[in-house]
Image (cartoon, rainbow, N blue to C red):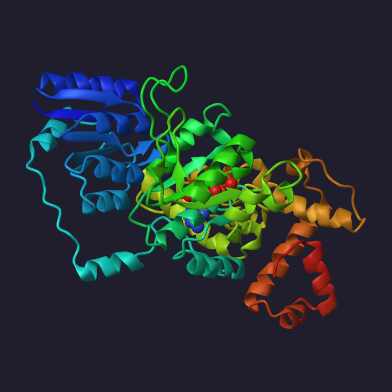
Amino acid sequence: MESILIVDNQVSVCNLLKRYLTDNGYTVDTSTQATHAIQLMKDNHYQFVISDYRLPKMEGNVFFHMIKSISPKSRVIFTSNQVNLKNVVNMIREGASSYLAKPLNPDELVEVLKQKPRSVPSPSASEKKEAAVEKMPDYVNGESKRAKEVEFKVGKVGPTNFSVILEGETGTGKESYARLIHHCSERKEKPFVAVDCGCLSRELAGSELFGHEKGAFTGAVTHKTGFFEMANGGTIFLDEIANLSSEIQMALLRALQEKIIRKVGGTKEIPIDVRIIAATNEDLFSKSGTTGFREDLFYRLSEFVLKVPPLRERGDDIYQFIDFFLKKTTLELGQKETPRFTDEAMACLVEYQWPGNIRELKNAIRRASLFANSKNLIPASALPEMIRTSKLRNASLSLSREGNSEPVGKQEYNERKDLKSVALMAESEKIKEVLEDVKYNKTKAAQKLNIHRKTLYSKLKALNISY
Ligand SMILES: Nc1ncnc2c1ncn2[C@@H]1O[C@H](COP(=O)(O)OP(=O)(O)OP(=O)(O)O)[C@@H](O)[C@H]1O
């Protein structure tokens, strides 16, 4: 009798499939968590693993590598609510048997299980070379000076084994840069395991990172493989590293220095070869020595420090991001044509300061895409109020800085349609239009607007127009 392991975070899906496949003559185990599933695979052999591509704490590609290293003969079938063609192609290319869209058709699933195993051709030398230069999927590089600087540094540090600290505001793409660094290294075929240290509880952080032995503490009913062991040979990304407790910082330092880990409740030394990339949105250097980030750990981790710029400092990259997220959302929603933002909406997007950076932009675009009108245009009204009103706010704040107006409360922006604000907006629009016309040549712009160059500069500053 052939055996199957079903991995899905929804218990109902596990139960439903288990019942159906048992009726069809298979022995079935289920698991709702990747780490538990990994343990089951270590203890049992399964002919098939049917897994959701998106598991709560582990991405499909990492899980796939784990399955292949523990149980290379198991045939893997991925399922997903949102079929991403690139993932499908990559997974099949790497040896997954199939990729099925959810909701699953049980008959189709049984048919796939009955198919003969596919032999996976090993890539030829030329294919390997092509894979090495392949661009990272789902990624916008950006053309701004700041983005180019970071890209240049990633290119330098990527292929080394240096530990890296990525410093930047929330949502600036630190994890994406960490993936890019991993992708540029010889470890790229090995797992990339991302850990959000902010979510690790004080009590369980050691067990999550280093694993535990059965019976190590109340509730430790099975052995557990920790994130470090999962990442062996690859890269571990420790996000929000400043949140680690001092005991865990100590254990991490030991693991880094000795290149071995010990599971909680265990005595065996497990050798590990893991590259560490850590991320923080605060200045760890100033934190070390003051609020308790260990200086020795900081120096160990900071073989290379990369500052990730906020979106507002990435100039015209915002246009690339808007285009990218619009197209991506169109695909996701199964729409035929990609919508466009109206000029007014576009102006709001460009002027907003994006404190939540790329993540905030992505979310705003995903949401706004649902409100495209019959001409496939997305109006400004589809944007969150904070973003919509930023244009007016910028103008009003500049004015108040000059002492010409009282500062305006947040709720008032929307209602504020007084002559002064309207005039300011019109002035700002006109200046931008002319600047664009003359390709940002300030002398020509001043001539066209019939004002002195110095006046133009002070208006650009007062109206918060970037040039
Ligand atoms: N260059 C990029 N191209 C496309 N999408 C990106 C890029 N950079 C970031 N994103 C998207 O923006 C969102 C936030 O990125 P990411 O999680 O990497 O930021 P972060 O700095 O690690 O955030 P946090 O500090 O909150 O952990 C993600 O959904 C990611 O897919």
Left or right of 246 on screen, residue 274? left
Foreground pick, 332 / 26: 26
Considering every residue shown, the one lying at the far right of the view is: 403
Residue 251 occupies quadrant: top right
Residue at x 91%, y 56% (from the top left corner): 404
- Please tell me which residue is depicted at 60% across the width and 35% down the height of the picture: 247
Nearer-the-camera pick, 86 or 366: 86
**Image position of 193 (left or right of 145):** left
Q: Nearer the viewer, residue 389 or 114?
A: 114
Q: Where the C terminus falls, by quadrant?
A: bottom right
Q: Vertically, is 436 above or below 322?
A: below
Q: Residue at x 34, y 26 (%)?
A: 32
> Compared with residue 108, is residue 337 higher up or lower down, i.e. above or below?
below
Q: How many marks do you count on the picture?
A: 0
- Residue 282 is situated, as x and y percent measured from the top left of the image, at 68, 48
Q: Position of residue 415 (x, y in %)?
A: 76, 41
| Residue 259, percent from left and from top | 46, 49
Quadrant (top left/top right/bottom left/bottom right) for the N terminus: top left
Q: What residue appears at the point 61 percent right and 67 percent down from the top-left corner? A: 146
Q: Is residue 364 visible?
A: no
x then y, percent, for residue 218: 46, 17
Q: Quadrant of residue 427?
A: bottom right
Q: Say whether residue 306 is visible.
A: yes
